[in-house]
Image (cartoon, rainbow, N blue to C red):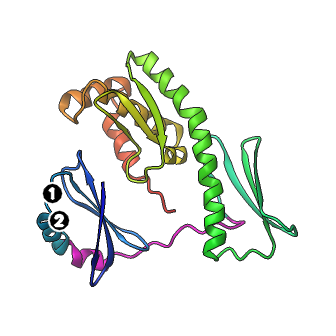
Amino acid sequence: MKEEFIDKDLGKVWVIRNARAMNVIARRKPDYIQLTVPHRFSLKQIFKVFDEMKPRLQLLEVKPKHLFNPKTVLETISFSVKIESRDVKNFYAKLESGVLNIICPSSFEFANDLVQNTIRNVVENTMRQEAKRIFPSRLEELARIHGFEYSTVRINKSRTRWGSCSTKKSINLSYYCMLLPSHLLDLVILHELCHTVEMNHSSKFWTLLDKVTDNKAQLLTRELKNIRIDW
């Protein structure tokens, strides 16, 4: 669930309540502050913690948004992105042989927000289509190998969670997992499969995740936490 308020010094603040969050996590974005809080935090608690964090947040440098242009180097699990500027009338894109070719008229100004959004939408739509093609079969394979059972799988566009699992054993995977290396995609899938057995992050959960990752649960989880999406 997302809420929003305006701070007089830092501007827009998005509050995301997360049932699994133990602490408040604040991230400085180009256009807003993202505040992830435990699900049952009251507004009074949120404002108190935010006020304590403000001095640090004011000092954080805002990283610029990723700029898509012909120099862009972007690799996903199943395709790479190649952007070209040509003497053509219309913008078009085609996924072929593992390459998403995006052709832009030479008149395009890549710093323009409309151009950026057009390219970003094409990339994200392709990621979604490829995730729907790849993730369910990989989930089924890993579940079979390790003896897990799940009910359904859905692909979503979450930027704050790689995946989730409901009490009914329904698994959600973000199509942004397409940006992960394959071994970390497997970690996300195995993490959610373990939640079909252990719905919390107890010692039993980590023991189970260790069992299915050759005792690399903590190591791989730390690697995953270092992955950031800059667009």
Q: Residue at x 34, y 27 (%)?
A: 169
Which of disc 2 and disc 1 is earlier in sequence?
Answer: 1
Q: Quadrant of the N terminus?
A: bottom left
Q: Residue at x 49, y 44 (%)?
A: 177
Q: Which amino acid type corresponds to the residue marked 1 in the rendered image? A: Phe
Q: Main secondary structure of the magenta part?
A: loop
In the foreground, 17 or 187: 17
The x and y percentages for residue 108 are 75, 74
The magenta region covers 53-71
In the foreground, 40 or 192: 40
Tell me, for residue 46, which label it has, or none: 2
Q: Would you place residue 184 above or below residue 169 in this image? A: below
Tell me, for residue 82, which label it has, or none: none
Q: Would you place residue 17 above or below residue 138 in this image? A: below
Q: Residue at x 35, y 40 (%)?
A: 219
* Residue 209 appears anywhere in the view: no
Q: Characterize the local packing of mark 2: few (<14), some (14-19) or many (20 or more) Cα atoms within 10 angstroms.
A: some
Identify the residue position indicated by label 1 in the image: 41
Magenta-span inclusion, residue 171: no
Tag 2 secondary structure? helix
The x and y percentages for residue 92 are 78, 58
**As drawn, is 98 to the left or to the right of 182?**
right
Q: Would you place residue 18 above or below residue 172 in this image? A: below
Location of residue 66 (image quadrant): bottom right
Q: Which amino acid type corresponds to the residue marked 2 in the rendered image? A: Ile
